[in-house]
Amino acid sequence: MSKSIEAKDLNVYYGDFLAVEGVSIEIASRSVTAFIGPSGCGKTTFLRSLNRMHEVLPGATVSGKLLLDGDDIYGPGVDPVTVRTMVGMVFQRPNPFPTMSIRDNVLAGYRLNGTRLSRAEADDVVERSLRGANLFNEVKDRLDKPGSGLSGGQQQRLCIARTIAVKPDVILMDEPCSALDPISTLAVEDLIAELKEEYTVVIVTHNMQQAARVSERTAFFNIAGTGKPGKLIEYDDTSTIFNNPKEKSTEDYVSGRFG
Ligand SMILES: Nc1ncnc2c1ncn2[C@@H]1O[C@H](COP(=O)(O)OP(=O)(O)OP(=O)(O)O)[C@@H](O)[C@H]1O
């Protein structure tokens, strides 16, 4: 299943520091949305608030509403661990568990949430997830070898397989290709295009070409100066953001005049 996301006037804090201010945005299900903007404008902070991941830092809080298919993920009694099962995350650096086998890496989410699978069920999950991440054919003969023995691009696709294994509704990606070579980057970009058939994908990227290649909608964030909060400046179809933005700061950023 794939779910829509709606933020309503969302503020994100680190202690007293307001890092992201007043973001309202609607992200359709089964779509790819790119978050772009200069360093420090709050892209990662906002992305991490979409699955309550920022809460692992003491003092990090939000105010406002964040709805997943209409349900407030910060509502009373909502368990952040459940939220993170529904909204998976892929990080900048591929981070497979190094001593675990490829197979066990894919199954890690089930182990963590205590779900027991029969051998046949586990085999199905491993194959489905690795196929979904376009990795199965490359690793099918070495599923019991450590995940750390794969190339960087393969490791990132293994992390994507681990994310989709638990059938999330949304996949968040924080600069997923920044540590990858161009060939591996293309493999991951191709995969993102396929993932949107089933998932809502949100990707933070510094690479304008990548945003233009993979996303249908783009959100441009900016910051007025050091110590000021990041804000969502413009959100539109990716082609509009790159070719005909409404805001001068968006145009300056996408044309490389700052940032
Ligand atoms: N753990 C933290 N504690 C306190 N402040 C933080 C923390 N993480 C980020 N910040 C601050 O929040 C603001 C937004 O940072 P964030 O990393 O979200 O920006 P970004 O747009 O993702 O930047 P980049 O493109 O460089 O990754 C910055 O001012 C940053 O210094």
Image: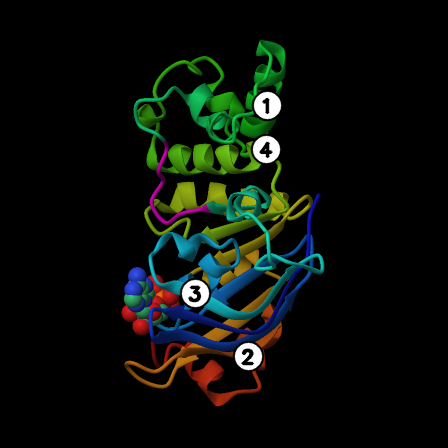
Tell me the magenta residue range.
90-96
> On the rendered structure, is 76 left or right of 177?
right
Q: Main secondary structure of the magenta part?
A: loop
Instruction: Give the numbered dot on residue 234.
Output: 2
**Disc 1 and disc 2: Cα gap in Å?**
39 Å
Q: Secondary structure at mark 3?
A: strand
Residue beneath label 1, please?
Answer: 125
Q: Amino acid at mark 4?
A: Gly
Residue 94 colored magenta?
yes
Instruction: Give the numbered dot on residue 61.
Output: 3
Q: Secondary structure at mark 1?
A: helix
Q: Are marks 3 and 1 in contact (CB under 8 Å)?
A: no
- Give the label, 3 or 1, closer to the camera: 3
Indicate whether 37 appears above or below 54: below
Given residues 106 and 8, the one toward you in this image is 8
Residue at point 34%, 31% (across, down): 151
Other-residue count near label 3 (Cα within 10 Å), few / some / many at <14 / 14–19 / ≥20: some
Residue beneath label 4, please?
Answer: 132
Where is residue 152 shown, x and y percent of the image? Answer: 34, 36
Residue at point 42%, 14% (across, down): 142
Q: Amino acid at mark 1?
A: Val
Where is residue 112 shown, x and y percent of the image? Answer: 47, 30
The mark nearer the N terminus, 4 or 3, is 3
Q: Are marks 4 and 2 in contact (CB under 8 Å)?
A: no
Q: Secondary structure at mark 4?
A: helix
**Disc 3 and disc 2: Cα gap in Å?**
24 Å
Other-residue count near label 4 (Cα within 10 Å), few / some / many at <14 / 14–19 / ≥20: some
Quadrant (top left/top right/bottom left/bottom right) for the N terminus: top right
